[in-house]
Amino acid sequence: MTEEIAVERGQKVGKNSFEDEFRRHQEISRLGAGKKFAGGLADHSEAASKYHTATHLLHAALRLVLGPHVFQRGSNITRERLRFDFSHPRKVAEEELKRIENLVNEKIREDLPVEVVITTLEEAKKQKAIALFTEKYEGKVKVYKIGDFSLEVCGGPHASSTGVLGKFKIIKEEGVSAGVRRIYAVLAS
């Protein structure tokens, strides 16, 4: 279509130049994605590892308090906070948020061990591990087990136990789109 329009206007499309530039763009994108997502999370600092572990506790607590329909729809973890998107059809009530926060803090106080097992995705699913975004996992996967509270396939870094996380505090809950909610939370000493 672009070529037809160009011909109508008396111009020519440089297909070879376009294809060269397109390949260059793809290579740059590939390199950037590799840096951003290597190992599941680019930031492997102690703070990011704590927040990643807190995200697993939050996910499990949401499912217990709100129901088994809750699944992660996205997340963003920094050294200062976590953002967690999840499936849920309505605003989360204040009392539910308090129960979720209390449950996460209870699991932190219990100082549960965070164990990792490397296995196949099929075996992880047989163990009833939550396995989301399965298209990004090839070959062996890491399954993180936090006591008897959480079992999830994940590629990111984690703390060695929940006791090092500090106090978990939900700072905001909001809607993102139809059927998707978002929670922001922080960890304090």
Image (cartoon, helix red, strand yellow):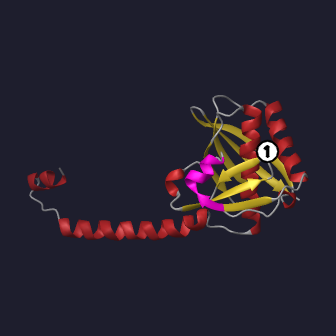
Q: Badge 1: how crowded within 10 Å, few (<14), some, or many (20+)? A: some
Residue 91: x percent and y percent? 69, 30
Q: Which residues are magenta?
A: 118-127
In the displayed structure image, the side of residue 120 where residue 79 appears, left or right: right
Q: Is residue 23 above or below residue 167?
A: below
Q: Is residue 27 above or below residue 151?
A: below
Is residue 96 in the magenta section? no
* Residue at the spot 83% in from the left edge and 57% down from the top edge: 162
Q: Main secondary structure of the magenta part?
A: helix
Residue 29: x percent and y percent? 43, 66
Residue 12: x percent and y percent? 12, 62
For the C terminus, give its image quadrant.
bottom right
In the displayed structure image, the side of residue 86 where residue 149 appears, left or right: right
Camera sees residue 35: yes
Residue marked by disc 1: 170
What amino acid is at disc 1? Ile
Circle 1 SS class: strand
